[in-house]
Image (cartoon, grey):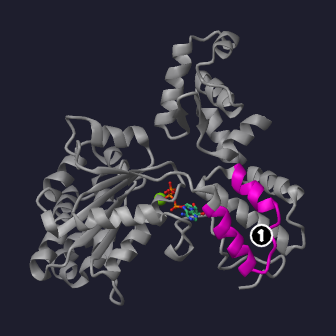
Amino acid sequence: MTGDAGHARQGTPFPFEGPVPPSLLIDRDRELELLARRAADRVNVRMVAPRRYGKTSVLLAHESVLRRTGWRTAHVDFSRVTDLTDAARRLAAGYGGLDVSWVRSHLQGLLARLGVSLSSSGPGLTLAPRPQSPDGAAAETVLHRMLDLPLTLWREDATPTLVVFDEFQDLLVARQDLDGLLRSKIQYHGDAAAYVYAGSEPSLMRELFETRERPFFAQADPIALDPLPLADALEELEARFRAESLDPGEALAELVAFAGGHPQRTMLFAYLLADRLADGAAGDARAAGEVVDAALKRTAPTHQALWQQLPRTERVVLGAVADGIAPSNEALAAEHQLARSTLNDAADRLTNQGHLVRAPRGGALVDPLLAEWLRRR
Ligand SMILES: Nc1ncnc2c1ncn2[C@@H]1O[C@H](COP(=O)(O)OP(=O)(O)OP(=O)(O)O)[C@@H](O)[C@H]1O
Ligand SMILES: [Mg+2]
């Protein structure tokens, strides 16, 4: 790879959108090791981490590790599912590759009624647009039989299956009782399968796994995905710049510190810096500043949209925390004529929504760019 100036960086070593391939994953060795151990023990796990913290990337790497040791793997993406038909289609798309010939001989007709077709070449399924009138019965049957596929296959060849349910919390939006349906199947899978439930909505994930009345209560071991360790991120990224024959100078260290371990923000900064260096700029403080400006410009519409939908109290809290002030600060409460408990409650809600992390003395914004946007407002 070369850093030819001014052109789109095809195959950049600094991907900043969507899951990254395992070869470009920074750190996460400890998490991968733990995930492998839990799968081997058939202990189900849940991974709750903020948006763009690398959940999908880590789980894809986990899947590829297990495939190398002879497992089957399925990755089901439940993000923004709206109803039962949607859920069945997503499940079919994720499980279809487990055993295409089984799916073809057992479910082809039903799947067609959900707008899912089996591709004649290669493994896997194709999702056509949803049919006009949803077929609830077909969806329910597909859900049941797909969910049992790991067990069916295990009985045939004693090969275990790893199933990843990504954005699992969105299932609750599709139908309130779907977690019950899932659990009623999964609970008999024993050695046949290991499950990972990933999500980015702390409050919904807590409702699913920490509410006594819910079927998944205490059913999965939590695994955290912390910010990237700054030293590891810097070392790895420096090596990638060198491999591109680019000298990131002091700018990279400054940007990595600014990103505070937020994985996607770190990569976005690295990408934008590489772009400048390839155009002949020096890796100095000025370049770092320009990178932050450019990143803010890219992300401002998202910050603006969030800001507009936040109630006043939440705005007060976010703005204060961005400035390094604790949410329940006395002067802050007085200034806005709000009770400190009111501010505290707003901070809790922001934490539940994944915007804030609480710390004993105050807290911090999850997204360093949102914090900067707020400071410059
Ligand atoms: N360990 C990592 N090493 C390098 N980059 C990472 C890592 N984790 C995340 N990223 C960066 O974050 C981006 C998003 O990663 P990914 O899609 O896996 O996160 P996610 O938590 O699943 O996000 P979402 O909430 O949007 O589903 C990647 O494109 C990459 O830039
Ligand atoms: Mg994801």
* Residue 358 image offset from top left, x and y in percent: 52, 33
Identity of the residue drawn at 68% across and 79% down: 10
Query: In the image, what residue type sits under mark 1?
Result: Ala
- The x and y percentages for residue 350 are 52, 33
Quadrant assignment, res 280: bottom right
Residue plotted at (55% across, 39% down)? 355
Give the side of residue 23 with respect to residue 154, left or right.
right
Residue situated in front as seen by the camera: 19 or 362: 362
Left/right placement of residue 164 relative to residue 25 reads left
List x then y, in percent, for residue 234.
67, 63
Q: Is residue 242 magenta?
A: yes
Tell me if mark 1 has few (under 14), some (14-19) or many (20+) residues whose alpha carbon lies within 10 angstroms of its own.
many
What main secondary structure does the magenta stretch of the protein show?
Answer: helix
Name the quadrant of the N terminus: bottom right
| Residue 131, visible in the rendered structure | no
Whether residue 145 is in magenta: the answer is no
Q: Which residues are magenta?
A: 232-258
x 38%, y 66%: residue = 33
Residue identifier under label 1: 274
Give 70 or 19, whichever is nearer the viewer: 70
Q: Is mark 1 within 8 Å of ligand 1?
A: no
Q: Relative to 67, does residue 216 appear above or below in the rendering?
A: above
Q: Secondary structure at mark 1?
A: helix
Q: How many marks?
A: 1
Quick check: 292 above or below 176?
below
Split into 4 quadrants, where in the image is the C terminus? top right
- In this rendering, the answer to whether 41 lies above or below 108 is above
> Which percent across, then down, holds residue 49?
46, 49
